[in-house]
Amino acid sequence: MSKLATEITDFQVVAKFLGVILKDGYRVKYLKVAIGDREFWIKLPKELSQSFDPNLSVGVWLEIRGTQQLERKKGILKLEASSFSIANAPDTSLSQAAPVTETNITKKKNQAACILICQKSDCWQSGGKEVYQRLEEELRDRGLSDRVQIQKTGCQKQCKQAPNLVIMPSKNRHSNVKPSQVDSLLDRYFDNAIS
Ligand code: FES
């Protein structure tokens, strides 16, 4: 019997608040939290984002409820909160009652997240250098630098469509990439850093 490609379940967890990830420099897009010894990013829908208290102290405990979506094929786990509130010291029994799924698949994905960008002359001189710089800036701004590596490569044999890059581990190739497309590329592949 085949398993569903995407599994959506509810979750409820007590987690330590580590900070937020902003979108466009001001909108709170994700809560960064620690669950056990792992860090997770939990997406906030617009209504929760708008009511987020910017004075929330790092280190407080939050009880968070929401849905988790596991895309088996890509090995992506997406978490989205439906509510959260300040909680008392961690309640082990609560955390263990409905833990966030932690799978080997997601671990593998985290290890392999990488952008391979061609640094040979056709690509580099056709805007590849600017794409590379934009990738670096954008990954840094999103707090993804330690999760998504950028690797310069030799010729990817697609010189006529320079500049070229490949997203790993999905191996999706993108050609004629413009710096202005970096934002949407990262949204598409690394929108949720939990993945
Ligand atoms: S120079 Fe980049 S693909 Fe050949």
Image: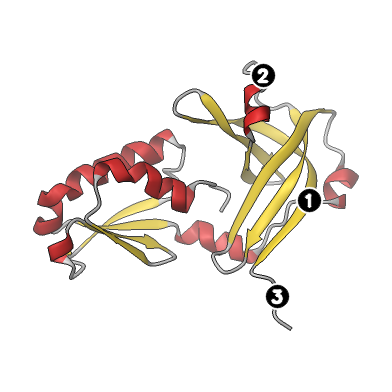
Q: Amino acid at mark 3?
A: Lys
Q: CA distance from mark 1 to mark 2?
A: 24 Å
Left/right of residue 86 with respect to residue 150 in the rendered view: right
Q: Tell me which label, 2 or 3, sits earlier in the chain.
A: 3
Left/right of residue 75 with respect to residue 151 in the rendered view: right
Residue contact between numbered discs 1 and 3, judged by CB atoms under 8 Å? no
What residue occupies the far front of the structure in this picture? 47
Residue at 19%, 50% (x, y): give it. 128
Q: Which disc is residue 111 wearing?
A: none
The answer to whether residue 147 shows anywhere in this view is: no
Q: Tell me which label, 1 or 3, sits earlier in the chain.
A: 3
Q: Which residue is mark 3?
A: 3
Q: CA distance from mark 1 to mark 3?
A: 18 Å
The N terminus - image quarter:
bottom right
Residue at 13%, 64% (x, y): give it. 160
What residue occupies the far right of the structure in this picture? 93
The figure's colour scheme reads secondary structure
Q: Which residue is mark 1?
A: 10
**SS at mark 3?**
loop
